[in-house]
C-alpha cells in the first residue's frame, strides 16, 4: 500500500514522514458557528484535501477521524455542496463524500439540504482573500442540531453562507486554514 498523501511506499494510509506533518486544528467560533477541524491545512493534510478535491481519491478513515469532532446531540450531517461545474469537472463533491464516511461511523443521516450554484468564481485564494460570494439555496428542511460538513474552511465565507441558509451553528471540516 502506498501513502495516500505522497504515494511513497508504506504500510499504512500515510507514510511516517507525512503522518508527522499532521497538526491538530484548534476549535474556533466563527460568527456564532462552532468550527471543529481535524487538522491544520498544511503538509499531508493539505495534500489529502487536494487529492479528494481534484483527483477524486477517497480519504480512508476520514469518518473515524472526524467522528470525535461531531458535537453531542447532533441530529444530521449537512454537506456544503461544491459548485456544480467543479463537481462535473473533477467528478466528486468532497463534502458529500466526507459526510457519507462520517455518517457510516456516527450513524447520523446525511441531508443534501443545500443547492450550490452552477458556477461561481473561485471563492478563496492562496492569500485567503474572498474572490466570490457563495450563494446557496435550501432544498430541504434542516432540523435543529444539524452539523455542516466540508473538506476545508479557508476564509469561512462559504461556511457562513451555508449556516445562514440552514441555521446550523456547528461545522466539522477535515482541514482548517483559518488564522487566529
Image: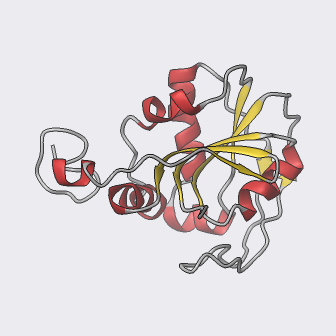
Residue for point 17% across, 47% down: 16
In this rendering, the count of numbered labels is 0
Q: Of residues 85 and 128, which is closer to you in this image?
A: 128
Q: Of residues 149 and 56, which is closer to you in this image?
A: 149
- Horizontal placement of 51 versus 164: left or right? left
Q: Position of residue 25 (x, y in %)?
A: 50, 49
Q: Is residue 144 above or below residue 24?
A: above
- Horizontal placement of 172 versus 118: left or right? left
Q: Quadrant of the N terminus?
A: top left
- Horizontal placement of 124 versus 45: left or right? right
Dividing the picture into quadrants, the one containing residue 158 is bottom right
- Horizontal placement of 12 versus 42: left or right? left
Q: Position of residue 22 (x, y in %)?
A: 34, 50
Q: Position of residue 29 (x, y in %)?
A: 72, 48
Q: Of residues 114 and 67, which is closer to you in this image?
A: 67
Q: Position of residue 153 (x, y in %)?
A: 61, 57
Q: Is residue 179 above or below residue 3?
A: below
- Residue 138 shows up from this direction: no
Amino acid at each position: 500500500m502506498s501513502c495516500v498523501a505522497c504515494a511513497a511506499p508504506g504500510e499504512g494510509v500515510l507514510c511516517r514522514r507525512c503522518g508527522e506533518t499532521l497538526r491538530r486544528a484548534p476549535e474556533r467560533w466563527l460568527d456564532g458557528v462552532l468550527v471543529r477541524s481535524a487538522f491544520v491545512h498544511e503538509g499531508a493534510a493539505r495534500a489529502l484535501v487536494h487529492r479528494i478535491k481534484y483527483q477524486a481519491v477517497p480519504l480512508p478513515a476520514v469518518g473515524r477521524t472526524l467522528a470525535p469532532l461531531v458535537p453531542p446531540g447532533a441530529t444530521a450531517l449537512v454537506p456544503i455542496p461544491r459548485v456544480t461545474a467543479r463537481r462535473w469537472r473533477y467528478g466528486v463533491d468532497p463534502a458529500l463524500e466526507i459526510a457519507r464516511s462520517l455518517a457510516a461511523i456516527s450513524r447520523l443521516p446525511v441531508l443534501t439540504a443545500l443547492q450550490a450554484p452552477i458556477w461561481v468564481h473561485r471563492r478563496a485564494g492562496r492569500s485567503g482573500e474572498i474572490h466570490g460570494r457563495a450563494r446557496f439555496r435550501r432544498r430541504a428542511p434542516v432540523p435543529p442540531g444539524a452539523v455542516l460538513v466540508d473538506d476545508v474552511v479557508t476564509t469561512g465565507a462559504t461556511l457562513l453562507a451555508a449556516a445562514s441558509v440552514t441555521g446550523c451553528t456547528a461545522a466539522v471540516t477535515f482541514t482548517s486554514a483559518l488564522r487566529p
